[in-house]
Image (tube, grey):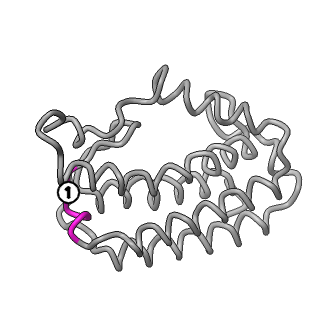
Amino acid sequence: MAQETIPTKAEIVSMLKETGSEGVAKLRSLPAGVWEQGRYENGWNARQILAHIASIEWAYPRLIDVARDAASPTPADSGAAASGSGAAQGGIDDYNTRQVAKRADASVTDLISEFEANRAKTVEAVAAADDSLFTVPIRSAGGVSGPLASVLNYIAVLHVAQHIKDIAGQDA
């Protein structure tokens, strides 16, 4: 992941809060008819994209553990921690499909609440993490590599914000 500057912990916390609260407000403001409209060529509609972002939000605090493990590996696993916990079983696309399918019966309100609750946990975990961890190189299960701060910015801030924009579509 090429990035000129690594965001600070304070910047990550601020961006997580902002994209979380703005995203939830935007999602709650959408008319009921938007949720079943197709948005992606793979067939996902807006509700399924919401299920995706709700389902992945829980994983972001675990990246802090990956950075912590990479910062102090034991001699036996030296080098292994930086690669994270490995790729998602079956690949990231299969993982995402399974997570969306698990939420097929969840209401839009429930999915927004799941995202909101998990985003609060992400913000809390990032705020509590030691500042030194944000420069530690990691690799997410989805294959995004770089310093923890850059990976969090890319997948927890930019990735989620883009999905929310995709959900809103023409209603943005």
Give the image location of residue 14, x and y in percent.
44, 78
Position of residue 78 relative to residue 91, above or below, is below
Disc 1 target residue: 136
Q: Is residue 99 left or right of residue 79?
A: right
Most distant residue in the left direction: 75
Which quadrant of the figure has residue 21? Answer: bottom right
Q: Position of residue 163 (x, y in %)?
A: 57, 51
Which of 18 and 90 lies nearest the eye of the viewer? 90
Residue type at tag 1: Val
Say above or below: 167 vs 102: below
Q: Residue at x 63, y 67 (%)?
A: 23
User: x and y percent of residue 104 in the render?
Assistant: 79, 36
Q: Quadrant of residue 96?
A: top right
Start and end of the magenta stretch?
132-137
Q: Nearer the viewer, residue 23 or 134?
A: 134
For the point 46% across and 24% down, which residue is it?
A: 91
For image coordinates 74% across by 61% down, the residue present is: 113
Q: Residue at x 40, y 37 (%)?
A: 142
